[in-house]
Amino acid sequence: MQYQAKVLLAFGEAISGNREIRDWLMQNGFPELALTCHAIQLDESARSWLMSNQHPHLMAMVSGAEGNPQAVQWLQKFGFNYLKDVALGADNDDEAIKRLIKAQQREWAGIALKIRSVKNQIERDNNDIHKISRR
């Protein structure tokens, strides 16, 4: 899985909600990255697309970021070590971020932090909805 640094930076911006960049990824040969942005936002059709189009590693990264230990184990088993650390880092593991930086994978570390931010906001929003519905 090799992407140029500028593509990874664009991916990070798309994760953070930049729709123009997400659309650019979709139209310029990186639909898997654009759809990963949707998968992070809990879009089931994007999740299915990733699995059906030879990108289970990206779906495992998303699932691992959501706290699924089997997804993290799968990434490690099949040699997706950077994605394993992205998933762990996105799931609030600061040691995983440090490992990515130490391995000179700053772009992936940044992606992990952007996924963390989005994931944590989704969780906060979801918790707020549950608090309101219990009243």
Image: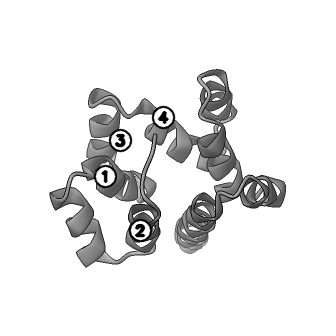
Residue 36, position as x, y percentages in the image: 38, 51
Q: CA distance from mark 4 to mark 1?
A: 13 Å
**Quarter of the image where one finds residue 51:** top left
Residue located 33% across and 38% down the image: 50
Which structural element holds mark 3? helix
Identity, as a three-letter code, of the amino acid under mark 4: His
Residue 122's mark? none
Q: Of the two numbered discs 2 and 4 on the same chain, state the one appearing first in sequence.
A: 2
Residue 35's mark? 1
Q: CA distance from mark 3 to mark 1?
A: 8 Å
Identity, as a three-letter code, of the amino acid under mark 1: Leu
Which is more foreground, mark 1 or mark 2? 2
Which is more foreground, mark 3 or mark 2? 2
Q: Residues within 10 Å of mark 2 (few under 14, many from 20)?
A: few
Q: For this view, does 1 lie left or right of residue 68?
A: left
Residue 27, position as x, y percentages in the image: 15, 59
Q: Of the two numbered discs 1 and 2 on the same chain, state the one appearing first in sequence.
A: 2
Residue located 62% across and 27% down the image: 79
Residue underneath mark 2 = 6
Q: Of the two numbered discs 3 and 1 on the same chain, state the one appearing first in sequence.
A: 1
Q: CA distance from mark 3 to mark 2?
A: 24 Å
Residue underneath mark 4 = 57
Q: Of the two numbered discs 4 and 1 on the same chain, state the one appearing first in sequence.
A: 1
Which is more foreground, mark 2 or mark 4? 2
Q: For this view, does 118 lie left or right of residue 85?
A: left
Residue 22, position as x, y percentages in the image: 29, 67
Q: Of the two numbered discs 3 and 2 on the same chain, state the one appearing first in sequence.
A: 2
Which is more foreground, mark 3 or mark 1? 1
Q: CA distance from mark 1 to mark 2?
A: 18 Å
Residue underneath mark 3 = 47
Q: CA distance from mark 3 to mark 4?
A: 11 Å
Identity, as a three-letter code, of the amino acid under mark 3: Arg
